Image (cartoon, grey):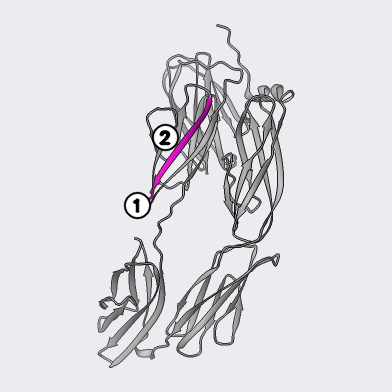
Amino acid sequence: MKKFFFSLATLFVAFNAYAQCQADFGYTNNLNTFTFSDSSTTSSGSIATWFWQFGDNSAPATQQNPQHTYDACGYYEVSLTIFTTSFCSSTYSDTVFVAQGTMPSFTVTVDTTTGDADFQGQPFSTNLVYTWDFGDSTTGTGVNATHTYDSSGTYVACLTVSDTGGYCTYTVCDTVIVYIAPPSCNVTWTNMSLIAGQQTFTAQPFDINWTYTWDFGDASGPGNGFITTHTYASAGTYTVCLTVVDSTNNCTAQFCDTVNIVFTTVCPVTFTNIYLAGNMAFTPTPLSPLNTYTWDFGDATAPGTGLIVNHTYAAPGTYTVCVTMTTFDGCTDTFCDTVIVPSSIGYEEYSSGISALQAMPNPASDQVVLEYSLTTVGDVTIEFTDLGGRIVFSETKTVNQSGQQREEFNLSELAAGSYMIRITMETGAAYVALVKE
């Protein structure tokens, strides 16, 4: 059998001289969510990879036809870079105008001893300007602001958010209940949510001589105790009041504030994929070890599971791949997209020699360990290849003993992204996908 050995970098230069391809795309806009449609063309081979950058410092996308939502109004330059199986690459850019921003919101915490109120605006963006009206004829600026109220009362505070280009302006208002209690029994509370609809309230300070009574604002019975947990039946904004009685000093104090209850029923999932030498690596978004992921590869094989999965297709073609994500709190969503498995591009793979290749951990940050097994001894070449097929690291060593092998690599100089690791020797080749955080 005649065998050919040459680097992907040499192959890329040889093919790119003759290959012709042109990146292009169109888009539609619904509110501020853009759907981008790939219309790229190639006269040689097929498009293997799409690489999108949306111009707002967000993470790139590698779907053929992605969606993207912008937080702030303005003009953004969107670019698409394609890579074909004939090693042609092309980039096309266009400017989109975002006419709507994300509706703002804010939370506030009031100190009952001093009347100090801490306001936290959302969302945060360097492209936005924040202006506050605290409801007592004073104003402030910044995404977060601190204001001291002079007396107890109910105030209507408003946050106005506008983009730096002057395209959009939004205002949201909410009531702020300020109660400055007598010094002898000042009280406040904090809240925390771990399960949708359930809140754990903690009073501050704790005094063994005080009694604590809670009104949760939803017509339910009162709660008692320094720490109490309450479950709300429906989403909404509720005014929660804590009343304390200091029997020693004959003092009664009350503190009220609002809580916003949100039930998350939507948990959208997507995935990206990269392909090299017959192996397709899939990565879901969002990526969380608390979620479970099930994969249908579209080729009648058994489904896969896991955060990052690799799959080898038996034949080139277009396949519909679906990922189903179930979150830790029971929300489920399924996303499907087509992937293209191209034909062989000019080098021969072998089915023996290297096996059981795995990268640990994966995703990795600073270091990765490769483990694999050899049935023969000889020269072994290890290559890291990026999305464009460029070799970013290569090492050749002589292995004098067959069996289990272990190699450790420093990733500190690699940019974050997806890579394909290829191990080759005269009798075989193996591949594994790696995500660098």
Q: How many marks?
A: 2
What amino acid is labelled 1 in the image?
Gly
Residue matched to label 1: 330
Task: Name the secondary structure under disc 2.
Answer: strand
**Magenta highlight on residue 318:** yes
Using the image, determine if residue 287 lies above or below residue 198: above
Image x and y of residue 215, in percent: 31, 79
Image check: 370 left or right of 137?
left
User: Which image quadrant for residue 293?
Assistant: top left
What amino acid is labelled 2 in the image?
Asp
Using the image, determine if residue 130 lies above or below residue 111: above
In the picture, which quadrant includes the N terminus?
A: top right
Image x and y of residue 90, in percent: 70, 35
Magenta segment boundaries in residue numbering: 317-332
Residue 89 visible in the snapshot: yes
Q: Is the magenta stretch mostly helix, strand or loop?
A: strand
Tell which of 228 and 37 is nearer to you: 37
Image check: 102 left or right of 407?
right
Residue matched to label 2: 296
- Residue drawn at x 62%, y 53% is 29
**Magenta highlight on residue 241:** no
Q: Distance between the residues labelled 1 and 2?
A: 20 Å
User: Which image quadrant for residue 3?
Assistant: top right
Task: Name the secondary structure under disc 1.
Answer: loop
- Residue drawn at x 55%, y 30% is 340
